[in-house]
Image (tube, rainbow, N blue to C red):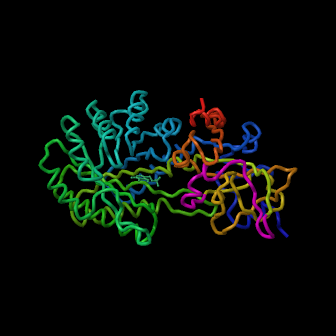
Amino acid sequence: MNTKYIDLINQTYYFPQEEFTLNKDHLEFHKIDLMKLVEQYGTPLKFTYLPAISNNIKRAKNWFRSAMEKNKYEGKYYYCYCTKSSHFSYVMNEAFKNNIHIETSSAFDINIVENLLAQGKINKSTYVICNGFKRDQYIENIARLINNGHKNTIPIIDNYEELDLLTSEIKGKFKIGIRIAAEEEPKFEFYTSRLGIGYKNIVSFYRKQILENPNLELKMLHFFINTGINDTAYYWNELVKCIKVYIALKRECPSLDGLNIGGGFPIKNSLAFEYDYQYMIDEILNQIKIACDEEEVEVPNIFTEFGSFTVGESGGAIYQVLYQKQQNDREKWNMIDSSFITTLPDTWAINKRFVMLAVNRWNDTYERVLLGGMTCDSDDYYNSEQNMNAIYLPKYSKEKPLYIGFFNTGAYQETIGGYGGLHHCLIPQPKHILIDRDENGILATEVFSEAQTSEDVLNILGYK
Ligand SMILES: Cc1ncc(COP(=O)(O)O)c(C=O)c1O
C-alpha cells in the first residue's frame, strides 16, 4: 500500500509543478531549499521570493499583448499595481522594475507615491489611479501631487461630494475617472456595492457636474467586481453592463478613453488550481471590441489593478509542528509555533485557502490532522484544503520535527494582520526574509525584519 506522504501528493495532484519540486524528501519552492531556510533562520518564518512579482507582471502583460493582437484591439494596456495588497518597499522596488503604473486607496499611499517619484522608481508618465473614499487628508495629498506637476494622476470619483472637494484644492485642469458601483453577486448580503456611483446615475452625473467644468477631463470609467475575474454568468453580465455605460458616456464625452477593469485575477490556492488566464483576457477584450464596434465607438485603453496576482505568489510562511494533541479518537491537533489568526488572517476571517504542504519528511507515512494555532482562540485553526476538507501530513513524531509551508500568501496578510503591531494573545510577528536571484540565477537571502520581541510589544503597550 502507498502510505507515504509523497504517494498521497502524487495520487491527488499533478506533482511536481513548476514552482514546487522535491529534493530527496524536502520540498523546494522555485528551487529554494526550504529546509535550508529553516536551518538558517528558524521558524516561524515568513518569506518573500521577489522574482515571482516581476514574473507575474510579465505574464499578464504578455497575455494582454497577445489578446490585443488576436482581437485586433486598437487600444493600449496599462498594468497598475494595487498597492493595498502589499505596500512594502521591497514589493514596490521589484514591481516598478517592470514599467507599470499604480493604484492607490488612501491618503498615505500618496506619500508612498511621492517617495517613489523622489527615488526615480516611477516618473511623470506613471499613472497614479486614486481609488477609495476620499476625505480631507487623501484629497489634500492628491491635490498636492497634481499641483506639483504629476498630471497623470487620475482621482476616481467614488461619491458625489468628492468632485467639489477636489476642485476646491486642485489648481487648473486635471483628469478624473468615475467608479461604477457594481451589482453584487446574487448570493451576497447586499445588492449594490457601496463603492462608486450607480450605473443609472453615471451619465446624468457627468452632465450635471463634469460637462460644464472646463477644469475637468473625464478619462476613465472604473469598475471592480468583488468576486474577481471569473468565468461566470455573473461576471460576464456585469462586464457587459459596464461596457454599455462606457459606450453611453463616450458618446457624450470625447475625452473618455480608458476602461479600468479593476483587480481580481485569482492565484494558485491549491495544487489543483486551474484557471485559463489567456482565455479570460481574450474574452474580455473580445466582448469590449464587439460592443464598441457595434456602436461605432473607439475601443478604450484597458487598465487593470491586480493586487493578489502581482504579489500573492511571492509570499510564504513556514511553521514547525510543535506538538500533537489527540483530543478524542478522531481529532489529532498538530499545534504550530505561531498563530493563523495573526500571521495568515484571511484563513480565519474569510476561510481563505492557501497551498499548504509539508516541507520535510515526504517519505514518511501520513495521517489526517487538524492544524491549530497558539492563541487561546478556538477559531485559530486551519482546516480547508482544496478537494478535500481535511489536512494530511507526515505522521507527527517527537524525534523528527515536522515543518509545514503555506504558499502564495504574499497579498493582504501583513496589513490585515497588523504587521509589527499587537497581535492576539501577543503572539509575536515572525521573522521575515527576502529572497532574490541575481542575473546568473544565484539566490541571495536577507532578513527584512526580525521576529518581534517582548520589548517591542511592551513598548506599544506603554510599559516604558
Ligand atoms: C478597486 C480595487 N482594485 C483592485 C483591487 C485588487 O484586487 P485583487 O487583489 O483581487 O487583484 C481591489 C481589492 O479589493 C479593489 O478594491
**Quadrant location of the N terminus?**
bottom right
**Percent of width and height locating residue 224:** 38, 57
Point 19% across, 44% down: residue: 216
Residue 178, given in percent of the width and then of the height, sits at 27, 53
Left or right: where does residue 111 sit relative to residue 440? left
Asked whether 267 or 419 is in front, the reply is: 419
Residue 347 seen anywhere in this rendered image of the structure: yes
Residue nearest the viewer, comparing 461 with 126: 461
Nearer to us in this view, 107 or 23: 107
Residue 199, compared with residue 426, is above or below; it is below
Q: Position of residue 46 (x, y in %)?
A: 64, 43
Q: Residue at x 72, y 62 (%)?
A: 370
Image quadrant in which you'd find residue 207: bottom left
Quadrant of the drawing holding the C terminus: top right
Q: Position of residue 151 (x, y in %)?
A: 27, 36
Q: Which residues are magenta?
A: 327-353
User: Based on the displayed image, in which of its 4 quarters is residue 102 positioned?
Assistant: top left
Please tell me whether residue 144 belongs to the stretch shown in magenta: no
